[in-house]
Amino acid sequence: MSAPRPAAARGAPPLLIDALEGLPDAGLLRHFTTRSTVGYPRLPDPTPEQLQHADAVLDNRFTYTGETYRFDPGFSWKPNPSTDKEWQIAFHKHYFLIDLAQAYRHSGNRVYLLRWRDLLTSWMAEMGSGYITLSDAQVEAKRMESWVTSFMLLAGTDWHRSIGGGFLRRFLTRISGETDYIADHLKPVRNHRTFQLYAIYLVGVIFPELRRQPDFLSLGLAKLSQNLLTDFHADGVHIELSTHYHQLVAETGIRMLELARLNHLPVSAELVERLRRALRFSLYLQWPDGDIPLINDSDTGNHQDLLELGSLYLGDPDLLWGATLGTEGRPPRDPSRAFAEAGYFVLSDGWGSDPASYARRQQVFYDCGKLGEGSHSHYDLFNFCYYAGGAPAIVDPGRYTYCGEPDADGINWRHYFKGTAAHNTVTVDGRDQTLYLSRTKHGPEVVLEHRDWLLGQRSDWVFGRASSPNYHPSHERLLVYMGHQYLFILDRLDPNDGEPHHYQLNFHLPAGTDVLQSREGDHHRFQSDRCEVRIIGASGLDAAVRPGWVSRHYGIKQAAPIVRAELERSGRVMFASLVSPRADGEFAVTSFGMRPLGSSGTCFSATITDGASRYTDHFLLLGDPTATVRLGDLEFCGRFLACRCDEGGQTLFASAMDATLLQVANRPALTFPDMSNFEWAP
């Protein structure tokens, strides 16, 4: 005979709706094993990593933030074995419950299920809500998501033969209480609030049996929709401008949409459109191998599952093309895309026509925007990542840690990975663009004074000018994706104070990269197995390979080379760089040099081969945009021009910034009363 329900006898408020509140434990268990009124989302198959983690948990071994600790049987949940508080935060989010449920579902071995039950029982007996107060209930929210997700993973198994009704009642009681706690401790804005509201919404959808369910569902549905709209810019990029947090919040949004569709709940058309834009950004930012560039606070991520889910619920075949890496769906129309509100630009040579050509794509992720909201920004204006030849070639080092305390050697690694020198841009006098104050705070922000761009059929370019409150010199960067084949990068720094300054240009390469350095004519040349970097600067330029660090997983860093050019000077300084795929295929850069254009400006030229063809690319930078210059068969008046000529000197195409005149050979002149950006081809 089943034990009677004990809660009401002790005066506790009703847990369940009237139809279920009086059920004995056996009846409650039977209800939850036979119910069919709740639409569960599609749950993923277990990964090898999840199965490995589940086996480790059986041995009381838990790994977070790059650190593994083994606990004694009957351990307490309160101590933190690590000096990094992020370890304890991750531990109390209970991701291990999902691993155990996946292992049980995969193997049918009840040892994983019993461990799931026993860990929950132990935690519920010892712990109250809000133990990690610094987390503002986001730990409770992610823990609740782990609880509910792991419970859903048990569907279709014989879990009820090993899990008693008494445990189920305690579990549901704690779910209701924890959800109330989350609702009472909502973060005012941004991603923590999104995670909290999603947990409330999830409980409201999955557990209609709870007496508080109408409150949970209405609160989650209304406020989560509202918060997701404010979490993403109108262009679809998450407001914190982190590729990692963009993934987490976009996943939350699309999971909300999935639950709504499955359970016939309303979702506003405005939110659906915003989620569509968010997933379009995920589509563009994803590298051709499925990984992502680690912009701002980010770890290794993969948006393929997110894109696949989005293609299903948003009806977008372009998303499926990215989700399957060119196997299914439809290639997007535009190879390059500007996300203007965020200031992010994704440049590409195309989307391929099948998996093989998809994998060979090039991709450039470029940051020409302000700092993101919150505390996840790095001081990385004009930073870029470059993917070519089937692998990342120039990378962002990632975040590594949230711990702001110096290590035994006195190094503050939080500052190191946030700092300007840890990114592919220029530092001035060894200072950050924005002053670092602590792991979450900074001084006045770098100011983006001007930005312009043109995304064309033959080439793309982005221009930006910035000033920093942390030093006097201003910085201009022009990044050109020439012929959608390689990068020309022009950095100009104006001291503004007549004093000498030390400038450092960095290009970070992946861990394990070997680099060969040489000097060829005007430029320094660096060759890796993935790309070539060529740098021209004034006399006295020192260029060499230096040691650095990258981190693709929180708490784990790897030694990695940095190509670094340095120069100290009192006047205006200019670095001109070419970044191209390694010259082992049909395309190769064979020379790079510069020459003055009289008093009008400077011309940088690169000779390239592309199969049997040979071309010369010219990059004209003019100090006086009203002066007319001649180059081969063209005349130009403007601020900047990139053009390609064949072996006979005939111009094949050109891309201009702030131009008033372009005339090629005997063709009609293009004139503009106001300075204009344009692309020209015959």
Image (cartoon, helix red, strand yellow):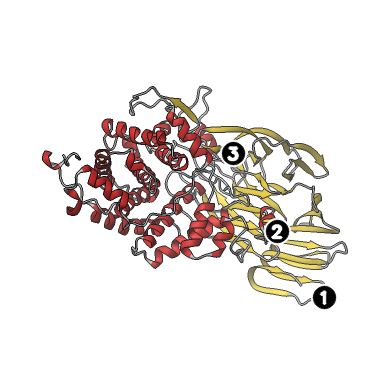
Dot 1 surroundings within 10 Å: few (below 14), some, or many (20 or more)? few
Q: Earlier in the sequence, mark 3 or mark 1?
A: 3
Give the label, 2 or 1, closer to the camera. Answer: 2
Name the residue carrying label 2: 484
The residue lying at 35 percent from left, 59 percent from top is: 226
Give the residue drawn at x 64%, y 36%: 511
> Vertical placement of 122 versus 188: above or below?
above
Q: Amino acid at mark 1?
A: Asn
- Tell me the kind of residue under disc 2: His
The C terminus sits in image quarter: bottom right
Query: Relative to the observer, which residue lies in front, 667 or 131?
Result: 131
Q: Residue under label 1, please give it.
A: 666
Furthest residue toward bottom: 668
- Say which amino acid is labelled 3: Ala
x and y percent of residue 221 in the render?
A: 32, 58
Residue highlighted by disc 3 = 421
